[in-house]
Image (tube, helix red, strand yellow):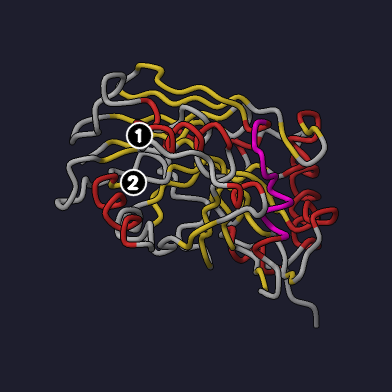
Amino acid sequence: MSFPHLLPSDLMTLLERGANEHKLLQKVVEHVDTERISKLKVEGEWIALPLKEVTLFSPLPRPRSFRDFYAFEQHVRTCRAGRGLKMVPEWYEIPVFYFSNHHAIKGPNKPVKKPDYTACLDFELEVACIIGKYGKNIVASHAREYIAGLCILNDWSARDVQMKEVKVGLGPAKGKDFATSLGPYLVTLDELEDRRIGDHWDLNMSAKVNGKVVSQGNLKDLYWSFAQMIERASDECALFPGDVIGSGTVGTGCILELGTEVQPWLMPGDVVELEVERLGLLRNVIQ
């Protein structure tokens, strides 16, 4: 006796089931592509709903892990110069990252509470790649095979706390672990192929605070590519479907880099909108 195949109802299940499940979903899309999806029902339930009638969660509300890299040279150079520091040669030798809190993921339009312990709340304009299959000791030349897709990422930061932590020689930790926004969609690499340049993607990035553009950059400006980040992260360490790898902040992509004379630290009521070409718009209100 054969049983009907139940399609995944969440992204993590889709990633865990692997490439064949993605192909099956593509066939379903192709099958209904000529139909008026808004009129189709299965067992009395609509198969699609208008976007304005739904609340989007993060594509991965609880990733398996979250590594955030430090891979845009302009951001690193400007932030270090602001503290009277030169670039360290080690930054050009290896892509570096820290682990952040994968249990504190926020979706689009989800309020982000300003922690009581900070007076210097900041945003960070980033892109994340989502790991799509298990791998270990992945070489950069094959790393794209392990990427399920890209998302916008906002690495919220308590800068005053972060500065204390890094002076001790560890961190960032408490300066970062209260919230990270991810979304609004996961965009698969086939949808971005026409914008790919080797292991980089030519995608414009921008950030608005209360409707004013304060940051602009491009994902292609990464010094360390996602392929190199994956190679580094997987060195003698397994990566799993649903792991998140952040790019780090694009040049001009945070208040720490811009300066508070350009944009004051964030306060309750402020609206932060990160937009990346092809990836959508990630909006959050500070609470």
- Looking at the image, do the residues carrying marks 2 and 1 touch, with CB atoms under 8 Å apart? yes
Disc 1 residue type? Leu
Disc 2 residue type? Ser
What span is colored magenta in the figure? 221-231
Which disc is residue 256 wearing? Answer: 1
Give the mark, 2 or 1, whose residue is nearer the N terminus. Answer: 2
- Residue 262 lies, in percent from the top left, at 31, 19
On the rendered structure, is 233 left or right of 196? Answer: left
Location of residue 52 with respect to 242 vertically, above or below: above
- Residue 265 lies, in percent from the top left, at 24, 32
The residues tagged by marks 2 and 1 sit, at their Cα atoms, a distance apart of 10 Å
Which disc is residue 20 wearing? Answer: none
Return the residue nearer the eye: 30 or 38.
30
**Helix, strand or loop at mark 1:** helix
**Helix, strand or loop at mark 2:** strand
Q: Quadrant of the C terminus?
A: top left
Quadrant assignment, res 214: top left
- Magenta span dominant secondary structure: helix
Q: Residue drawn 76% across and 70% down? A: 137
Residue 281: in magenta span: no
Which disc is residue 157 wearing? Answer: 2
Few, some or many residues within 10 Å of mark 2 (<14, 14–19, 20+): many
Q: Residue drawn 58% across and 38% down? A: 72
Return the residue nearer the eye: 230 or 29.
230
Return the residue nearer the eye: 117 or 184.
117
Q: Residue drawn 67% across and 73% down? A: 238
Return the residue nearer the eye: 73 or 221.
73
